Amino acid sequence: MSGFDKRVELPFHLRRRFGLLSDAGAAEVHSLAHLHVPAWLRPSVAERSWPAGVAVAVAIALQFILPRRLSLPPRELLPSLEAALLVMLTVANPGRLIRERSSLRAASTALIALITLANAGSAALLAQRLLSGHAGQTAGPLLLSGGSIYLTNVIAFGLWYWEHDRGGPFARAEARNPYPDFLFPQMATPDIARTDWEPHFLDYFYVSFTNATAFSPTDTMPLSRWAKTLMLTQSLVSLVTVALVVARAVNILK
């Protein structure tokens, strides 16, 4: 491999793809000297943990903003569990995501699941109260509650996408899986991006936001079935929330 681009240490799946696992394949190295493997396909620097941590903290704060009648009882239970898990995960990886353990992965998944459960419960309670005529007497509080649920929905699904695409942030940093669950434009057209580009949390948050707004994929396509199922679920929750809240708010303003 000495004749290859020394900036790149190709992982197993790429060496297999280019036939460089055997002595015979090594003869092709010089013909591939011009090749530069994009960052998302090779081992790279571990992702920073604070963007996802900030998003989780915002989601927890939004749950406390909601009126008590729109929170699953007891009101403080789920947000408190989420805060405890967030502290544990932050202590385990305070800077970059370099410490990978099965227990930490389980805690991260549990944290996202709790946020999703709490928000789904709030959305269901809001829908039930709107349909029964027991909520939405004034536009301001209604829009605030609907906006909080909508934004928490965006954060929760952004975390799901980030946590599971190509095995999660640890697996992506080590380039364990070359087959993406989400096809970003920079992957499909690498010439438009820097060679050190790779998806981070903000990219997945953007995917979640555009899916919740457009009720469909925009520039990033889901490839795996689980990714399509999650995007479908998120679109459905967003559509119901927006439709009910906006319809009620319009009636109030009239």
Image (cartoon, grey):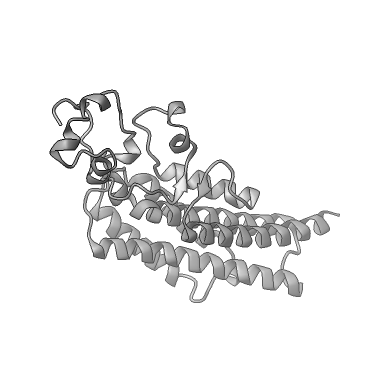
Q: Position of residue 70 (x, y in %)?
A: 59, 69
* Direction from residue 234 to residue 45 in the image, left or right: left
* Residue 82 sits above or below residue 176 on the image: below
> Residue sitting at 67 percent across and 62 percent down?
240
* Direction from residue 116 to residue 146 in the image, left or right: right
Of 211 and 74, nearer the camera is 211
* Direction from residue 246 to residue 50 in the image, left or right: left
Of 5 and 244, nearer the camera is 5
> Residue sitting at 68 percent across and 57 percent down?
242
Of 38 and 114, nearer the camera is 38
Q: Position of residue 196 (x, y in %)?
A: 34, 31
Q: Which residue appears farthest toward the right when viewing the image?
A: 254
> Residue sitting at 29 percent across and 23 percent down?
34
Q: Quadrant of residue 187?
A: top left
* Residue 28 sits above or below residue 184 on the image: above
Of 215 and 88, nearer the camera is 215
Q: Position of residue 44 (x, y in %)?
A: 26, 38
Give the number of callouts: 0
Q: Quadrant of the C terminus?
A: bottom right
* Residue 62 sits above or below residue 14 on the image: below
Q: Quadrant of residue 126?
A: bottom right
